[in-house]
Amino acid sequence: MSKILERINCPDDVRWLDRRELDALCSELRELLVSTVTENGGHLASSLGAVELTIALHRVFDSPRDKMVWDVGHQSYVHKLLTGRREQFSSLRRYQGLSGFPDRNESPHDAFTTGHGGTSVSAALGMALTRDLVRGDHHVVAIIGDGCLTCGMAYEGLNHAGHLNTRLIVVLNDNGMSISPTVGALARRLNVVRTTSPYIQAKEQTRRLLSLLPGGKRLRWALHRLKEGAKAVFMPTMMWEQLGFTYLGPIDGHDVAELEKALVRAKNYHKPVIVHVLTIKGKGYKPAEDNPTRFHGVSPKSESPVTTPTYSQIFAQTVRGLLRDNPRLVVISAAMIEGNSLSPLAKEFPHRIYDVGISEQHAVTLAAGLATQGFIPVVAIYSTFLQRAFDQILHDVCLPDLPVIFAMDRSGIVGDDGKTHQGLFDLSYLSLMPNIIVCAPKDENELRDLLYTSLTTEHPMAIRYPRGQGANVPLATELHQIPIGKAEIIKQGADMAIIGIGSTVMPSIEAAKHLAPRGIDAMVVNARFA
């Protein structure tokens, strides 16, 4: 490890570095990110793009006194490295090691435990309101990526923050995934003028003076309308200011000095502020820059080449055939086209694969609407994210008994993704709901058959399958209907019964084999349905 990073044990150490040392630190951080994440797995491209931003945040703000809330948290690796966790970074996403996301139990610098998208503004606003109630003077900063602005909850938080006019800083880390703002010299110049303290003071003095003059209220209104019209033409501010935020930006997200200036300006305001930062996802690592989607999430290094298809791949292959055979079939994904192995299908069926972004609630009710018109929607979603749409599943799908298919990837224990991403709760909460059929395949063939069966049930159906490779069984040449609610006896036995479902069936078969030499004849049952 290089000498600059070795000297960083807390955020205070970052504030003493000069510009040359900061450049070196950025390079060292990126080297460590690439080496660790390619070994352990994790979110690489997002963290690479947030290096300079994270450094600037810790140079301007005083963590943990000032609160930083990272949306999703997958871009917080550098934050961990700068806040005393450098020595433990090799344990990232490993058993009893560092979490891949911010965790309040891990460090006082992690103000909020995160893992899902769109939560930062609401959580940060709650912290800001608490500060105001106890008459504190510290800052609260939410860092949110532009992709999370597809999440309705983010706008709920922004709307409420603007309404309350509470002192809050929201940093929008725009890496080009969904926003393309106008950038120009005039916009930059106007932004510099309007965010300095003299301008703020002059604006307030002008307002007071006009209020004392006869007709000053009308004149002030006319000047305000003229200013708003000019901003609408020259600056990408209107949406944010209509929400009640002051807009600063766009700022070069890879220039620490410019970032610091913008963040210091944001501290001058006593109202909500948006700091719009432009970054490059995967910055500094060419493979990630060239293909940021592929390097968004990286699997751990494997000693042997992976040849067995994953359940996600089997799902996508099966759905491709079903899409070709059934023109009424459509697929909905909530920002997980790549994770669900649906990218090739999105190119082949561009008008029947819908990516709604991080909008799980919308995804479910969108599917319900499609189902009312005779289409068969498949909601391809990670189990951990489906729980965000509990009410929509119950109220919009299950109560009216609409034939929506939920293909729930990453169900069960997902290991190194950590506690925020475990798919452990779906069996319990879905079983509470009326009309829905909940099932889990024991292997690849059963996944294919359950998908095929789901097309004709005319009821909601949830198919849960695990992360990673399948059981490596030979794939059948044809798909078969599975009787709804019927279990499968895999092995007869006289002494005991082992009942498994989904990913627990294969271990149940192995357990029966181990019991046989001990004189225990165990029956093995594949429950299939919950």
Image (spheres, rainbow, N blue to C red):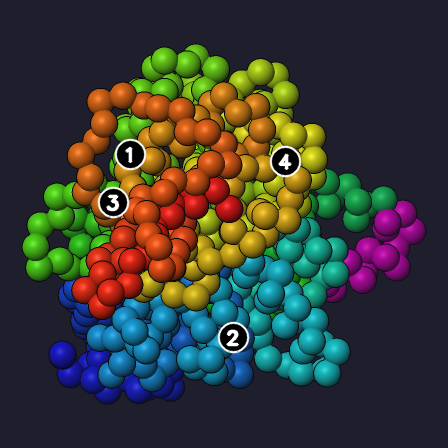
In magenta segment, residue 150: no
Residue 17 sits in quarter: bottom left
Question: SS class of the residue under badge 2?
Answer: loop
Residue 278 is situated, as x and y percent measured from the top left of the image, at: 39, 51
Alpha carbon separation for disc pair 2 and 4: 41 Å
Closer to the camera, 530 or 311? 530
Alpha carbon separation for disc pair 1 and 4: 25 Å
Q: Which mark is residue 111?
A: 2
Mark 2 and mark 4 lie on one chain; the one further toward the N terminus is 2
What's under tag 2, amino acid-wise?
Ala
| Residue 241 seen in render | no
Residue corresponding to mark 4: 435
**Are discs 2 and 1 less than 8 Å apart at CB?**
no
**Are discs 3 and 4 less than 8 Å apart at CB?**
no
Mark 1: few/some/many CA within 10 Å (<14, 14-19, 20+)? many
Alpha carbon separation for disc pair 3 and 1: 10 Å
What's under tag 1, amino acid-wise?
Asn
Closer to the camera, 190 or 168? 168
Mark 3: few/some/many CA within 10 Å (<14, 14-19, 20+)? many
In magenta segment, residue 210: yes
Write the start and end of the magenta stretch as one range: 204-217
Mark 2: few/some/many CA within 10 Å (<14, 14-19, 20+)? many
Residue corresponding to mark 1: 445
Residue at 74% x, 61% y: name it: 164
Answer left or right for 120 relative to 478: right
Question: SS class of the residue under badge 3?
Answer: loop
Q: Considering only vertical position in the picture, is 19 above or below 520?
A: below
Residue at 34% x, 84% y: name it: 84
Answer left or right for 439 relative to 31: right
Residue corresponding to mark 3: 470
Question: SS class of the residue under badge 4?
Answer: loop
Foreground disc of the pair 2, 1? 1
